[in-house]
Amino acid sequence: MSEAKRVDVVVVGGGAAGLFCAALAGQRGRRVVLLEHGDQVGRKILISGGGRCNFTNLHCAPDRFLSQNPHYAKSALAQFTQHHFVELVRRHGIAYHEKTLGQLFCDGSARAVVAMLLEECERGGVEIRLRAREIAVQRGAGGGFRVSSTQGDLDADAVVVATGGLSIPKVGATGLGYALAEQFGVPVIAPRPGLVPLTVGDKGWTELAGVSAPVVAWAQGSRSRFAEKMLVTHRGWSGPAMLQASSYWQPGGSVCVDFAPGSQVVVPLARRDMAALREALRRQLPQRLADFLAERLRPQRWTDAALAEVERQLHGMELRPDGSEGMEKAEVTLGGVDTRALDSRTMQARAVPGLFFIGEVVDVTGHLGGFNFQWAWSSAAACARAL
C-alpha cells in the first residue's frame, strides 16, 4: 500500500449527517477527515424547505419513522433530541420560525445551517476534502481501514458512511453507501422512493392539475393517517398528504382519501339530485374537484342507502396509483442498510468493528416535515459519541 495520512476517523459523505458527525467527533479530540465527492457540502440542505431548510420538527418521536426494525431509532432520538439541535441553532444566532405542525424553518436561507455545520467542523479541526472521487474502503494491513480516493489515501481506525440514499440524484446521490455495506457483509434492504408524488393514467384526474384541497390520506392497510393538503398534478397526486401516504404505499395497492374530514356532506341533502350534490360538494371543496367527484360518485338511485354509500366513498375513496415519480422526485429513500446489523446506540456494524452507518443510508425514514433531518442529527450524534 502507498503512504497514507494517518487519522482517527474518515467520514464518507458531506451531507447533514456526515458534517454533523465529523464536527462532533472532531470536538471530542478525534482527527477527522471528511470526504465529499461533489464540489460542495450540504447540497441537499441547501435545496430543502424551498431553500429555507426545515431543519427539525418539534413533535419528533420514534413513531414518525419507518423501518423494518421499528424500535431501532428510539435510542439515537432520545440521546440527541430536536431540542438539542434547536439550542445549537440558537447559539449560532440563526433566526427560525414554526411553519405548521411543528416544522421549524430558517427565516432566511438554508445556507445559514450549512455555515453553522462548517463552523462546527472548523471548531473540531475537521479536514474536508471535496471532489473526492472513486472512493474505496479496504481493511488496513495493521487493522483499521485504508480509504482511497482521488484526493489521496487515508489510514483510519474508523469509517463513518454518511452517503445518503438515492433520492434527488441531481444533488449527487449515489449507491456508494449500499455498495460499501454489501462489501463488508452488512445486509441492505432494497431502496425505494419515499415521500414521492404518485402517478396515474386517468385523464379525469390529471385534467384537474393545479387543484388542491385539505384531505386526510392513508395508504391501504396502514394505520398512519395524514391530515394535510392534496395537490393534483399533470401526472397524478402530490401535496403533503399524498407524499406522506406514499411512504406507506405499496405498488399495486391503493391510497385512500377522505375529501370531507369531520363533515357530513351527502346524507343531509334536502334535495336529491345532481345539482344538490354538486352544490354540497362545492361548499367543501374547490369547484373543479367538487364537480369531478360529483360525477364520479353519482348514485344510480337517490335512496337513503345510495346516499349513505356516496358519503362513505367520499370519506374513504380508493385511488389506485400506476406508480410513482421515482427517485428523481422522491424527497427521501426508503430501505437501506439493515438496522438489525447495526448497534442502535452507536450506529456501528455489529460484525465489522470500526464501520458505522448514519443518516439516510440507513433503513430509517422519517415523515415529511423535518423528521429526516432530525434523524441525520441524532444518528450522527450517537455515532460521534462512540468514536
Image: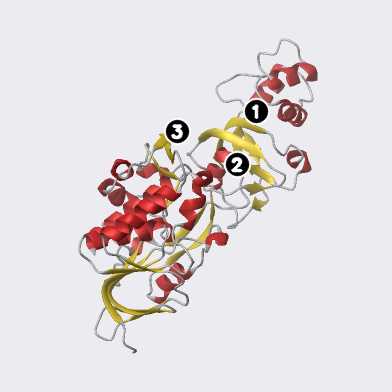
The residue drawn where x is 52% and y is 61% is 166
Q: Position of residue 230 (x, y in %)?
A: 61, 36
Residue 255 is labelled as 2
Image quadrant where one finds the C terminus: bottom left
**Residue furthest out toward the top:** 270
For disc 3, the neighbor class at 10 Å (few under 14, some 14 to 19, many from 20) is few
Residue 8 is labelled as none
The image quarter containing residue 34 is bottom left
The amino acid sitting under disc 3 is Leu
Closer to viewer: mark 3 or mark 2: 3
Mark 1 secondary-structure assignment? helix
For disc 2, the neighbor class at 10 Å (few under 14, some 14 to 19, many from 20) is many
The amino acid sitting under disc 2 is Val
Residue 101 is labelled as 3
In the image: residue 40, left or right of residue 271:
left
For disc 1, the neighbor class at 10 Å (few under 14, some 14 to 19, many from 20) is many
Q: CA distance from mark 3 to mark 2?
A: 22 Å
Q: Is residue 352 above or below residue 88?
A: below
Q: CA distance from mark 1 to mark 3?
A: 25 Å
Q: Is residue 282 above or below residue 251?
A: above
**Residue furthest out toward the left:** 29
**Residue furthest out toward the bottom:** 1
Mark 1 = which residue?
314
